[in-house]
Amino acid sequence: MATITKVDFPQILQKLIEEIITPDILKNGIRACGLYLWNPNNINFDKFLGTNLVAAVDEHSLIENNLNFD
């Protein structure tokens, strides 16, 4: 097994980023860790107690949809 040194690491990382890692791989890796980008549609509200949470997210969605993120 070869040892990776501080000198070798940047070149290896650059090759990985340019040739192997795709946006889908990154997204799936993040999801595999249990992390998700904020999207109220990804929340399973059946796991929450109470009914005010749905209204709060709906209000947030209305505000977010009126903002221009371009």
Image (cartoon, rainbow, N blue to C red):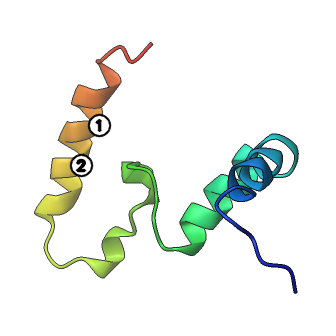
Task: Please identify the quadrant where the N terminus is shown.
Answer: bottom right
Give the answer, above or below, for where 6 lies relative to 32: above
Q: Tag 1: residue type?
A: Ser
Q: Tag 2: residue type?
A: Val
> Is 20 placed left or right of 39 in the picture?
right
| Circles 1 and 2 in contact, beta carbons < 8 Å | yes
Give the answer, above or below, for where 25 lies relative to 45: above
Can residue 61 be seen here? The reply is: yes
Can residue 21 be seen here? The reply is: no
Most foreground residue, 10 or 43: 10
SS at mark 1?
helix
Give the answer, above or below, for where 50 lies relative to 52: below
- The picture places residue 67, in percent across and down from the top left corner, at 29, 18
> Is 50 placed left or right of 3 in the picture?
left
Most foreground residue, 33 or 13: 13
Q: Residue at x 52, y 74 (%)?
A: 33
Badge 1: residue crowd in 10 Å (few <14, some 14–19, many ≥20) = some
- The picture places residue 48, in percent across and down from the top left corner, at 24, 76
Most foreground residue, 20 or 66: 20
SS at mark 2?
helix
Task: Please identify the quadrant where the C terminus is shown.
Answer: top left
Q: Residue at x 41, y 48 (%)?
A: 39
Please give the residue where the numbered disc 2 appears in the rendered image.
Answer: 57
Quadrant in the picture for residue 12: bottom right
Mark 1 and mark 2: span between their CA atoms?
6 Å
Please give the residue where the numbered disc 1 appears in the rendered image.
Answer: 61
Numbered circle sitting on residue 37:
none
Badge 2: residue crowd in 10 Å (few <14, some 14–19, many ≥20) = some
- The picture places residue 14, in percent across and down from the top left corner, at 75, 45
Q: Residue at x 38, y 49 (%)?
A: 38
